[in-house]
Amino acid sequence: MHGYRRIGKVNIKPVIGTARLDKLTGQDLDRLYRHLSQRRLSPASVRRHHALIHAALARAVKWGMVPANVADRATPPKAERPDITAPGVDEVQRLIAAAEKTDPLLATAIAIGAVTGARRGELHARRWSDVDWQRRVLRIARSLTVIRQQVTEGPTKTHQVRQVAIGDLLGDLLVARRDQQDIYAQQMQARLCDDPYVLSRSADGSQPCLPDGLSQAYKRVARSIGLSGHLHGLRHFAATTAIAGGMDVPTVAGRLGRADPVWGAGGARMDRYAADRTVKRLAPRAGITKTISPHSLRHSFMTAQFYAGVPIRDVQ
């Protein structure tokens, strides 16, 4: 919410803030988008401004303040997907080995990211109570954010709670990490808090590592062995290795906490428009002449289940 307030105050209000709501046009918005692009904001960032304006005007329409949403008549720049290259298995092993020599905590962070595919905020919010040693799973239910140097914990990006198997390698690294934390607390004559953070440099484990700090540490270690990339690349590594290992895409999507596990050929995620185009393209090949959409497949599934005798509660 803080980010949206800042967008409105710093970027939107100075350009179109004096325009009457009922006099605002799509051209005014296009002028704003050109202004933001000239300030070298990325297309994705400009589209976030557009989304905020569109949502505000949609509420204005709902309240009867304006007859139509003029944001529908504006043309924000097309978003360009960043080309994020996932590290290979050998590179991840080299990263962990290099980090273990200088920063064992970072080595643990890399291993957790590579195995679980956790988002950066999710990675830093992990506490020891999230580790189920008996079942060898890691519970991911919270995420860490930093706003104005204020650290807060909240739900994950998709508000999902998931449990991810950690395997023997990560399990061993976590055991070593807990031992290191115990030893450091003893050296500093401190007592660990009731539920320490896994990734914490404080003596009592009560303060998590900040995301930006660990991201910079990752880049330094990567450069030291001739690699490049970001901490987020480990999330892509987790996805690609899981799919290459034979795990089905919906399972991988659930493991990564994706809210929209709709995928296309080669594992590329599809948005709703791409899915709609795909269904319409495939329908004629299947001899279907009437107009259908991805949502109509939902109805077809329910109908087929009813005909097969599946109870309505199970279908729901």
Image (cartoon, helix red, strand yellow):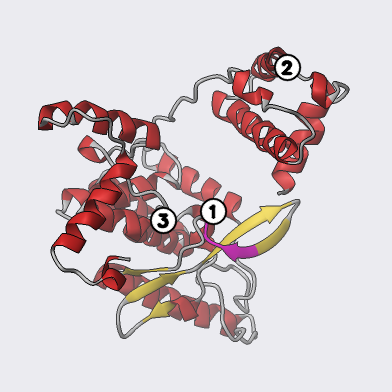
- State the residue position of label 1: 214
Residue type at mark 3 is Ala
Q: Residue at x 60, y 66 (%)?
A: 208
The disc, 1 or 3, on the residue closer to the chain's N-terminal end is: 3
Residue type at mark 2 is Thr
Count of residue discs: 3
Q: Main secondary structure of the magenta part?
A: strand
Span of residues in magenta: 153-157
As displayed, is residue 146 above or below residue 179? above
- State the residue position of label 3: 99
| Tag in front: 3 or 2 | 2
Front-most of residues 19 and 256: 19
| Tag in front: 2 or 1 | 2
Q: Is residue 154 magenta?
A: yes
Q: Relative to 300, is 308 on the left or the right?
A: left
Q: Residue at x 62, y 26 (%)?
A: 46
Q: Position of residue 230 (x, y in %)?
A: 45, 42
Residue type at mark 1 is Leu
